[in-house]
Image (spheres, rainbow, N blue to C red):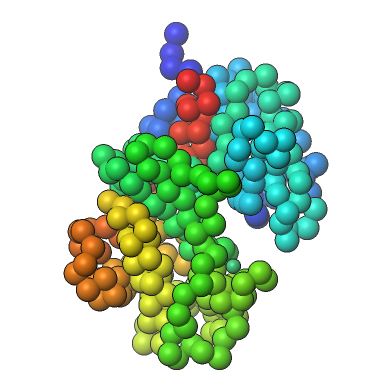
Amino acid sequence: MGAPLYGLVEAGGTKFVLGVARGPDDVIATTRIPTTTPDETIAAMVDWLAGHGPLQSVGLATFGPVGVDRASPQWGHILATPKPGWSHTDLVGPLAKRLGCPVGLDTDVTAAALAEYRWGAGQGQPAVLYFTIGTGVGGGAVIGGQPLAGISHPEMGHFHLPLHPADTGFGGVCPFHGTCLEGLASGPAIKARYGASLSELPADHPGHEVIAWYLGQAVTAAQAMFEPGRIILGGGVMGTPGLLERVQAEAEQLGNGYFRGKAREIVVAPGLGDRSGLLGALALAQAAAS
Ligand code: ZN
């Protein structure tokens, strides 16, 4: 008998990444399917996993907002979302019904925080935060080995922060809050202002400083609230050369030596690289099986 086989789902707004694995270094197969309508996408997800079973359990790391309270009838359902057709979609039900195994679920960012805590840059840390800065901005936390949730999962991309002095004319892109962190620093917010992604802008473009300043604010707020041992920054925007170093410098300056640990040690890239999402699903699957 080998180690049990787990099903993995990283559900995103543009694609679903699927996999089966026996452990973090033993991912046996992966595939990706485009996110189209809920019916079509969920059927393709369930079919692929069923074809790779039997599975011990499935871990589902999904875009949000999603019901994460197991006691609620909304557990495993996408909540009200601007994404057309996806509001109130049941992600977990079809999986559990067809595969007949336990399903673990959390947001993609909380799952990534869990994977980084278990196998990546957050190992051994009592509190680990993971932020993604991409099409949206989101964050998740693992405190004492457990995913953090209140009455729902955290919404760490949606707090307000001061406007950069060179950025006061921009109203932000968040449909709910305008100039929240996501409204100011997500990929679409960058494109709306500058007409290009951050990595496409010349190295001396002021946009680099503006975005690093906002992310420095976010990191410093997270330090004040959690004093995490690691704040891990992932997502497409963080692929911009030099951005991580700029954010570390901003956070160091804003923190003014008050917090424990140096920002350049606390604020880091994902240790698992682009695998933190799928391995987050593995961590959820293993938790669901135990
Ligand atoms: Zn917002």
Quadrant housing residue 166: bottom left
Q: Left of 85 or right of it: where is 21?
A: left
Q: Left of 160 or right of it: where is 234?
A: left
- Tell me if residue 28 can be seen: no
- On the image, the x and y values in percent for residue 192 come to 60, 80
- The structure residue drawn at horizontal position 48% and vertical position 20%, both measured from the top left corner, is 290
- Number of marks present in the image shown: 0
- The structure residue drawn at horizontal position 40% and vertical position 33%, both measured from the top left corner, is 24
Ligand 1 falls in quadrant: bottom right
Foreground pick, 241 / 255 = 255
Furthest residue to the front? 151
- Vertically, is 103 above or below 124? above
- Vertically, is 23 above or below 219? above
Quadrant (top left, top right, bottom left, bottom right) of the N terminus: top left
- On the image, the x and y values in percent for residue 2 come to 43, 13
- On the image, the x and y values in percent for residue 150 come to 53, 46
- The structure residue drawn at horizontal position 62% and vertical position 72%, both measured from the top left corner, is 177
